Image (cartoon, rainbow, N blue to C red):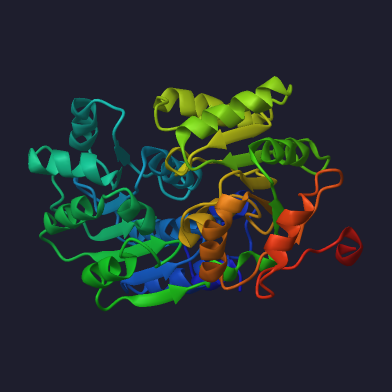
Amino acid sequence: MIFDDFMLDQPLLEAVAELGLSTPTPVQQEAIPLLLAGEDVLACAATGSGKTLAFVLPLIQKLMDEPNKGKLAKALILAPTRELAFQTQHVISTLASALPTRVAMITGGQAPTAQVNYLHEGADIIIATPGRMLQLVEQELADLGAIEYVVIDEADRMLDMGQGPDVANVLAAIKTAFQTSLFSATLAGAGVELFAKALLPNAQRVNINAANQYAKQVEQTVYLADNKEHKLALLKAAVTAEECQSALVFCNKKERAVEVAEYLQSQNISAQVIHGDYSQADRRERTRKFRQGTIKVVVATDVAARGLDLPQVSHVINYDVPFRGDIYIHRVGRTGRAGKLGNAINLVEPNDQKNLQRVEHHIDQKLPIRKMKGLAPRAKNNKKMSKDKDKPRYISKKDRD
């Protein structure tokens, strides 16, 4: 299948071609025809699988078919974070040659009065975070009376962040009939399945097997660590390896993220930390330096990393194994994107074992345990880890080659 098969207008096809795209991803192949046909869609596909283009392309095509002649927006895209909202805006702006589209950004981090002015000037698409959108709706500063299309992006993250009620209240404020699409990396955790059924009871489902899709394009590895000092040594070896061009290191707590970043800096490794206490301007500046290659390593928490536009990540390193499998999917989805090969490394101390077992159960596979030269764990740790024959075995370099 190619993009021409979707019967999109020529200007839109040319805009897609200018992006260097010719073959749609699996989620695009399944979701785009359904959305063009006017169906409600519930799509489950991993981060980096092309979900944004899967809903942006049919949305712009519909606006081309029926141009918006008024000032009120016809489409509403809800995103969990302002970073992701801006990323979606960027995708839309890259297709602007097909249709000059008026986009109003309604997110935190900006004065509400300025955002109200954007709406009064006229918009075709509103891209918003749920909380700020609800605030303007409740204050009668935003009019959703012309909305025909609603997209709920990264629904699982929204629920993780407690935004479910805000989303429901925003949608309840729309009194006209509208087509809805909901995109999520997983239907597991935080009641995503129930949330989706409540909002889209008759939706067409698109499931790209998000939990297991990394087997081919991402090499996943476990390295056992005896203690904190051993884990830091493994981390240093991983990020200084020749094959590591850039790394996104995840920690479960911001205090640990700061500690890890400071350790890497002390080892003369270009690293910066991003966590929830940093301003939007600081996050953008640090991610800009990472994309440009000035910074090799970004150490982040899950909350801070949501929505960050980091397309060139050769390695994702879980310094802390996440508490849930769906979080692991989001993290690993940062590498191996757009058909490129990626690497996911998990540094596992004995107290990380329960989290690792949850991850392996969620993705329905055992992750291979390997050793770094000169950094193998102690023998007693090996014995403990190999006791259960259902757990992953060690794979020697000879076996791998």
When asked about the image quadrant of residue 108, the answer is: top left
Q: Position of residue 392 (x, y in %)?
A: 70, 68
In this view of the protein, which residue sits in the foreground, 125 or 314? 314
Q: Where is residue 173 in the image (x, y as percent from the top left)?
A: 11, 54
Disc count in the image?
Answer: 0
Q: Residue at x 42, y 56 (%)?
A: 56
Q: Which residue is drawn at 56% across and 52% down?
A: 352
Split into 4 quadrants, where in the image is the C terminus? bottom right
In the image, taking residue 257 as reference, residue 35 lies left or right, namely left
The answer to whether residue 95 is above or below residue 229 is: below
In the image, taking residue 252 as reference, residue 122 lies left or right, namely left
In the image, taking residue 171 as reference, residue 314 lies left or right, namely right
Residue 333 seen in render: no
In this view of the protein, which residue sits in the foreground, 115 or 199? 199
In the image, taking residue 276 as reference, residue 66 lies left or right, namely left
Q: Residue at x 61, y 24 (%)?
A: 262
Q: Position of residue 382 (x, y in %)?
A: 75, 58
Residue 113 seen in render: yes
Q: Where is residue 184 in the image (x, y as percent from the top left)?
A: 41, 61
In this view of the protein, which residue sits in the foreground, 399 or 35? 399
Q: Residue at x 43, y 23 (%)?
A: 281
Split into 4 quadrants, where in the image is the N terminus? bottom right
In this view of the protein, which residue sits in the foreground, 19 or 9? 19
State the residue lying farthest toward the front: 380
